[in-house]
Image (spheres, grey):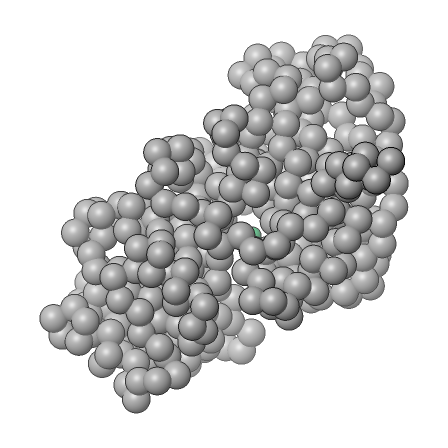
Amino acid sequence: MDAPAGVKTSTDFPLPQSMKAWVLGDPGELKLTAKPVPVPKRAEVLVRIDASAICATDLEVIYQGPPAIIQGGLPFNKNFTPGHEYMGTVVALGPGVDEYKIGQRVACEIHAGCGQCKRCREGMYTSCHNYGLNYGDLDKGHRANGFTTDGAFCEYQVNNINTLVAIRDDMSDEEGALVVTAGTAMYALTELGGLVAGESVVVSGAGPIGLMAVAVAKALGAQPVILTEMRENRMTIARALGADAVVNVGKVPDLVAAVKALNGGKGVDYVVECSAASKAVNDAVHMVNRGGKVCLAAFTHEPALVDIAHIVSNNIYVYGIRGEGKSAVHRAEAFMRQKRFDATKIHTHTFPLAELPTAIRYAKDRVDDAIKVVVKPRLEAAHKAAAE
Ligand SMILES: [Zn+2]
Ligand SMILES: [Zn+2]
């Protein structure tokens, strides 16, 4: 990277001109190519990516396109690099940046809001009204790396300083890549939901967000925390992360009744829907008690039939969640720093960045009971060094 005036670099972290980067061709097609190392602008740093986790939303982007928007449309064949759950090391500072130091390890949030729209000014930068308007000649300031701007399946990326969360040195790269996942669960329950200790929570579906929702709910003092799920191995992990009860969706005749029975027959204060099953949305509105809240955190592929009269007559709140927001990730990192839960229980596999297609196959087909699969650019280097 040729550092323009005002950009600080360090001889401790010499920067190459180009880097390895995966780019999306046709749906499902990833090619390894070279791209120039990006240059941080004002209020931005360059992050050397040390670990990226594969998220179900990456699979959506790679195979279907949305929610990524590149140049106003689908992300295919636009030299776009996906990947959005990552951590790394700060290796260059944009002009005027003194909030972070070169060499500092950071977890990286996905969204840098434009900072000027109504939602950004409320702290809801993942709902930025200038989402996706940061391409071509337009620069509205909003970035969502891996969705509207280049992401993390490469060696370096630029991040706005507002998107960085410093992590402690003894946190592993893999755990660091899960800080934002935990932050999303935090945002669902506290900032958007308003959960306080002693309230009851159901999480439906034990994907990574669901499992983190169990862990965060428990750490926040929720009781009981109930998981609904079908896969035994994930139920075991949920129990280890603090679930008070687990209901096997495939083994009870009436899921709603089974959940209610675990909480005095009244239903719970919150349901966090993470299963993406269209039926689960209607189940969720029947699992909450009057005035309760349903957070929708998964994309159903078919429209869901929901009993609206039940929602209306019971004052039920239903809200979607897009990523993180309002410093939720900082709070999640604080819990992880205090070892209030062990996010690494959801990490199952690590591959070198060069083996991204294999890593994606593990995540997509749940090979070997994969949950969170991580790729590491420097693992490759480490392997190579060991071989030489
Ligand atoms: Zn994600
Ligand atoms: Zn905005």
**Is 186 or 239 nearer to us in this picture?**
239
Tell me: 63 left or right of 79: left
Look at 85% across and 54% down and name the residue there: 31
Q: Is residue 226 above or below residue 16?
A: below
Can you see residue 362?
yes
**Is 83 or 50 nearer to us in this picture?**
50
Look at 76% across and 12% down and name the residue there: 11
**Where is residue 316, by image quadrant?**
bottom left
Q: Quadrant of the C terminus?
A: top right
Q: Position of residue 40 (x, y in %)?
A: 71, 24
**Is 229 or 65 nearer to us in this picture?**
229
Q: Quadrant of the N terminus?
A: top right
Tell me: 257 left or right of 305: left
| Name of the residue lying farthest toward the left | 264
Look at 60% across and 67% down and name the residue there: 368
Q: Is residue 364 above or below residue 347?
A: below
Look at 79% across and 37% down and name the residue there: 386
Tell me: 336 left or right of 254: right
| Name of the residue lying farthest toward the front | 387
Tell me: 331 left or right of 83: left
Q: Position of residue 191 (x, y in %)?
A: 33, 44
Q: Is residue 373 above or below residue 170?
A: below
Q: Is residue 36 above or below residue 383?
A: above
**Is 343 or 66 nearer to us in this picture?**
343
Q: Position of residue 262 (x, y in %)?
A: 19, 71
Tag count in the figure? 0
